[in-house]
Amino acid sequence: EAQVTQNPRYLITVTGKKLTVTCSQNMNHEYMSWYRQDPGLGLRQIYYSMNVEVTDKGDVPEGYKVSRKEKRNFPLILESPSPNQTSLYFCASSLSQRARNEQFFGPGTRLTVL
Amino acid sequence: QQQVKQSPQSLIVQKGGISIINCAYENTAFDYFPWYQQFPGKGPALLIAIRPDVSEKKEGRFTISFNKSAKQFSLHIMDSQPGDSATYFCAATPGRGAGGTSYGKLTFGQGTILTVHP
């Protein structure tokens, strides 16, 4: 089944404790993104990757890191999480950066930083 | 700065009624306008999309109306059903003419929580 998977689905952590949220897709997609969803703000792009070893900042990159060493995986790293990073996170992938390619979203990771 | 403004924030409709969600944008480089549907506990999924060279696109009970001069577009759900209860996001993306890394980047509206009562 074609899908985007994320782990963990739920995470409660404390301020300053490094964490990684994994994302994997099995569709051989080139383009991958991370979004955060907050009430009243919609989905905002954190980072994106156009292909292996090619990553760039989205609209809200502060406090996050990413890497793209393999085409299928795009982990999101919070080196020193803070309470304002409490949010619902989504990974997404699409065939390429091309404007009309459908983006496929993972099931989400709900993160709480105490 | 919210480049795509969506309203209302929430909407309650009776079964069989029409649900209407509106979006407005400023960036004239946007040239593709998808709508995503998100059920509780799930990620968003593409519902329907429109290009700016057409004024309306219909897929079953879902219709997008597009007004290029007003820079507005809307989603109409006819004969709304309880199963349509979800959060709806409009989005916009620049075309190739925008150049660089903007091309293909999705900008989302704030979302509308739709509840359809039986």
Image: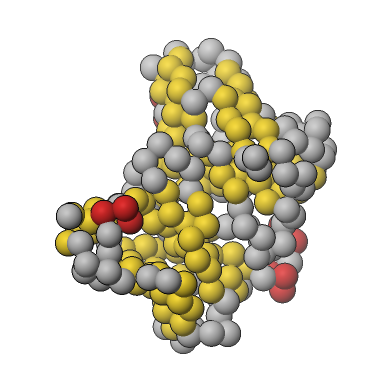
Q: Position of residue A51 (x, y in %)?
A: 79, 45
Q: Position of residue B59 (x, y in %)?
A: 46, 72
A68 relative to A28, above or below: above
Number of on-image labels: 0
Task: Specify whether residue B95 is in view.
Answer: yes
Residue in the image at 63% along x and 27% along y = A22
- The residue located at (40%, 36%) in the rendering is B41
| Up/down of A25 relative to B116, above or below | above
The residue depicted at 18 percent of the width and 54 percent of the height is: B117
Query: Relative to A106, is B61 on the left or the right?
Result: left
Quarter of the image holding residue B17?
bottom left
Left or right: where B91 falls relative to B95: left
Where residue A42 appears, as percent x and y from the top left, is 42, 50
Which of the image's four quarters has the C terminus of chain B? bottom left
Instruction: Report the front residue among A114 and B111.
Output: B111
Q: Quadrant of the N terminus of chain B?
A: bottom left
Structure colour scheme: secondary structure
Is residue A40 shown above or below B21?
Answer: above
Report if residue B3 is visible in the image: no
> Residue at coordinates 72% horizontally, 62% vertically from top-left?
A98
